[in-house]
Image: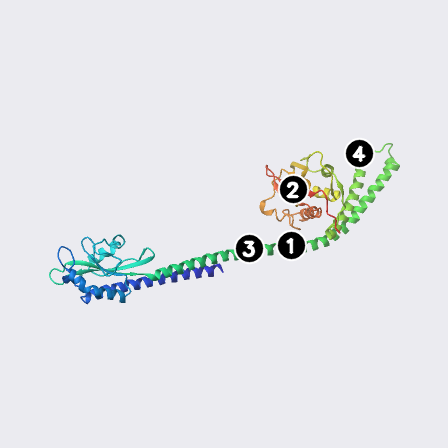
Amino acid sequence: MASVLLLLAIANWWIYNRVEAVLDESLGERLSSVARTLLATSTIQGDALQAGAGAFDENELLFIDDVLKLVQEENDLDAIVLLDPVDFRIGYSSSDLYRAGGEYAHLATHGDAIAEALTTGSVTVSTTIPVGSIWLKSGFAPVYTVYGDEEVVGILVVEASAGFLGVLETVRGVMVSGMVATGVLLLLLVAVYLGLQSQIRHATRALEREDRMTALGRLASQVAHEIRNPVGIIKYSARRMMKWLDSVGGGRREVDPELREMVQYITEESERLEDLTDRYLAYTRHGSLRISPVDPRDLVESAALALERSEPPAGITITIESELGLPPFEGDPDLLRQVLLNLCWNAVEAMGTDGVITLFTRQGESTGGSRGVVIGVEDTGPGIPEGLRERIFDPFFSTREEGNGLGLYIVEGIVRAHGGEVDVETTLEGGARMVLRLPNEVEKEA
């Protein structure tokens, strides 16, 4: 469409310039024809005009005045003028536009055409010039004596208004306005087109996400089924070990407190894993949460402790930065703890064997500008490239060959279920900062 409009604009502009050139050329030919006719029919005779001392014969001017005025009227001319060939003053004018004895007003603009006429001895035509509110074109021809030495006694000037140029100016104004309006319309169409394309892309991505969520639901069912059995065995074994330690001490006089703590930890984590597996499955199907008061500092400390127990590389340092006096907020502590753990392990994988992970909390604003809490994880790794930030939350998208692309998708889903949002930022040192903005209260579903 843009190409068609551009071609139409170019065609219209070419036609306009062509019409202007043809009409201007036609006017020039008409002026030349009138000048040649006046000289060829001896209406203006150089011998008769010559009065000596560069002046024109007054009687001859009176004799031809009526004829020249008639020629002016019949040919729709503005004036027929005779100029002195020496000082170019006006010796005669058939129109009131010029006064005999005065200076020729267009000598500066038409000087080249006059000089050419005197040099070549032929009829020349000037360019069309604006004069006030009209456009003027002039034809020039030298007036010679026939007898004697063929002396130039005057310069014949034939002038006419190019009224068509005023009309063409109006047409050009309309054309320019039309082109501007067309350009504005084109820009609006482009804007609408781009807007529709953006909506189509968003709708397409939403459909893709829905398809992936359906696949995720099926995958979650399979994973939950596969995990339940080994987790149940681990939990049952840990409980039997704890009962054995409590009853007989394993044949020892005194139970090793570190061994007891490890068995207790296995029991707790297996129970938590079993519960979390069931709740992941329920969440992917229904997005259900178990809401209770959550202390921000307790939440990050619990996630940090779980990360330490998972034994990250020795070069990884875990720190906590928490504002004092933060009030509890409503949320699902287990799911939010798992969210922080997912983010922490992403940070570990990004940094490798060396770096610093910082879990932080502070007062802030949630989505919509209401009061809330800000919780996040910051690392000293390479950061997340700008071009990937919109895709990292898509299901099954991963930058690692061994990744399944579900971690950040679940993270975003859990945060959104709490009425919050996840922001991806870059630290001053170039690392990644994942910021969770959560409201103080979660809206209850009806």
Nearer to us of marks 1 and 4 is 1
| Label at residue 258 | 4
Contact between labelled residues 1 and 2, with CB atoms less than 8 Å apart: no
The residue at which mark 1 appears reads as 206
The residue at which mark 2 appears reads as 434
| Label at residue 194 | 3
* Above-or-below relation of 242 to 222: above
Nearer to us of marks 4 and 3 is 3
- Label 3, label 2: how far apart the Cα atoms are: 31 Å
- Label 2, label 1: how far apart the Cα atoms are: 23 Å
Q: Nearer the viewer, residue 169 or 100?
A: 100
Nearer to us of marks 3 and 2 is 3
Q: Is residue 253 left or right of residue 203?
A: right
What is the three-letter code of the residue carrying label 2? Met
- Residue sitting farthest toward the right: 247
* Above-or-below relation of 58 to 398: below
Under circle 1, the secondary element is helix
Nearer to us of marks 1 and 3 is 3
Mark 1 vs 4, N-terminal side: 1
What is the three-letter code of the residue carrying label 4? Glu
